[in-house]
Amino acid sequence: MELSNRLQSLPSQFFATLVKKVATAIDEGRDIINLGQGNPDQPTPSHIVKAMQQAVENPGTHKYSPFRGTDEFRQAAADFYKREYNVNLDPETEIAVLFGTKIGLVELPLALMNEGDLLLLPDPGYPDYLSGAGLANITYETMPLHSENAFLPDYDALTANQKERAKLLYLNYPNNPTGATASIDFFEETVRIGKTSNIGIVHDFAYGAIGFDGQKPVSFMQAEGAKEVGIELYTLSKTYNMAGWRIGFAVGNAKMIEAINLLQDHLFVSIFPALQHAGAVALTGSQESVDELVALYESRRNTLIAECNRIGWNVSSPKGSFFAWLPVPESYTSEAFADYLLENADVAVAAGNGFGAYGEGYVRIGLLVDEKRIIEAISRIEKLDIFHP
Ligand SMILES: Cc1ncc(COP(=O)(O)O)c(C=O)c1O
C-alpha cells in the first residue's frame, strides 16, 4: 500500500539518525554520554504521581472526557496563568487542552491555514514545526535567529510580500535550541507586527518555567494586546517532568483557540480524565519542585559553561531552557563535529543544522545528565586536543 502524497511529503526526522547512531554505539558496549537528547531526566514530583494514582482508583475518571477537556483542568490552567503571570483567561473560550504542545503546534496550520498562506518559522527552531507545515500542505519561510541579535528574529528583515502572505508566525522563548530568552519589549514589538500585518502569533512557551540567574521567563500573554493577535502553548512536560504523560494547553486569542478545539472535536475525545486531574494538581499545587528543578538545571549549566571555558571552548551561557548552544571549531561542520565527538569521545551532541540552516556552526547540548557526567564529557573532549585554554 502506497503512503498518501501528504505523508510522503513530510520532512524526514533529522535526529532519528543520531538516535540510531547512539543506540548502535551503546549496543557495542560503549559508555556513551548522551547530551544530544531533550528528554527530562528527573521523575515527576511525587505529589502529582499520587494524585494520578488516586484519580485512577476513582471509576468516575474511567469515562470519556468532555470533548474540550474537564472544567477542572481548564480552570487550573487559568488559575496558573493568573498566579504566575497575572494574566486573566476565560477557561471556556481562551484555553484549549492539548495532548502535549507538539500536537497543538502541528494542528495549528491545519486548523487555520489555506494554500497560499505563509507560515513564518524561526531558524534554528524546533523541528516539529515543519511537520505542521507538511501535514497542512502549506508553505513556510524562515526568520533567521542570529547571535548578534540575541537569537531574536529581526522583524525589519521581513519583506512586504512575506508580511502580506503570512497568516501565522511561530516563536519560542526560552528557546530550543539556543537557550535565548525574550523580553516584554520584544513581545510588545511582536504584538505590533501581528496587528499591523494581520499575522497570528503562536508562542511556544515549552520552557516557560526554566529561566536562570533569577530571571523568570516572560509570557507572551503579558504583552499588552497579546490576546488580540495570538496564543501561547504551555506544556507540563518540562515544568513538572511529565513528558511521557502528554498534557499541555493553549491560551489566548479566542478565535484561534476555537479553531484548535473544532479540529480536536473531529480528531479526539480529550485526555484521560484522571490525567487531567493530575495535571490540575500539578498546576495548582505546591511549586517547590519547580524551583528545585530550575536550581538543578542552573547548577548543571554553570558546571558545563565553566568546564567548557576551562578547556578553551569559549561559549556563552544560556539564559533559559535546558539547552546550551555551543559554537563548533572553525574547521568542522556541525554534523562533522558531532560525529567526531561521538566516535572519538563517546559523547553525543545534537548537530545544529538539524534545527535549520542557521543552526550550522553550532551543536546543542542538553543539561539532562548529572554534573559528574557533564564534567566527564568535557574532560573526554579536552583529551581530543581540539581546544586550547
Ligand atoms: C520547543 C519545544 N516545543 C514543544 C515541545 C513539545 O513538548 P510536548 O509535546 O511534550 O508538550 C518541545 C519538546 O521537546 C520543545 O522542545
Image (cartoon, helix red, strand yellow):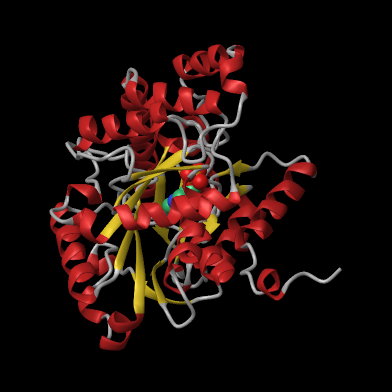
Residue at x-position 58% and y-position 67%: 135
Residue 389 visible in the snapshot? no
Residue lying furthest right: 1
Residue 24 coordinates in the image, percent (x, y): 76, 49
Residue 52 coordinates in the image, percent (x, y): 53, 18
Q: Is residue 134 above or below residue 64?
A: below
Q: Which of the pair 188/25 is nearer the observer?
A: 188
Residue at x-position 58% and y-position 41%: 269
* Residue 8, quarter of the rendered image: bottom right
Q: Is residue 263 above or below residue 213?
A: below
Residue 88 coordinates in the image, percent (x, y): 20, 39
Residue 381 coordinates in the image, percent (x, y): 52, 50
In this figure, what is the number of numbered marks?
0
Q: Which of the pair 14/346 is nearer the observer?
A: 14
Residue 319 visible in the snapshot? yes
Relative horizontal placement of residue 99, taking residue 212 as reference (left or right): right
Residue at x-position 18% and y-position 47%: 222
Q: Which of the pair 76/178 is nearer the observer?
A: 76
Q: Is residue 44 above or below residue 333?
A: above
Residue at x-position 67% and y-position 52%: 19
Q: Which of the pair 353/260 is nearer the observer?
A: 260
* Residue 182, quarter of the rendered image: bottom left
* Residue 80, quarter of the rendered image: top left
Quadrant where the image shows the N terminus:
bottom right
Q: Is residue 338 above or below residue 308?
A: below
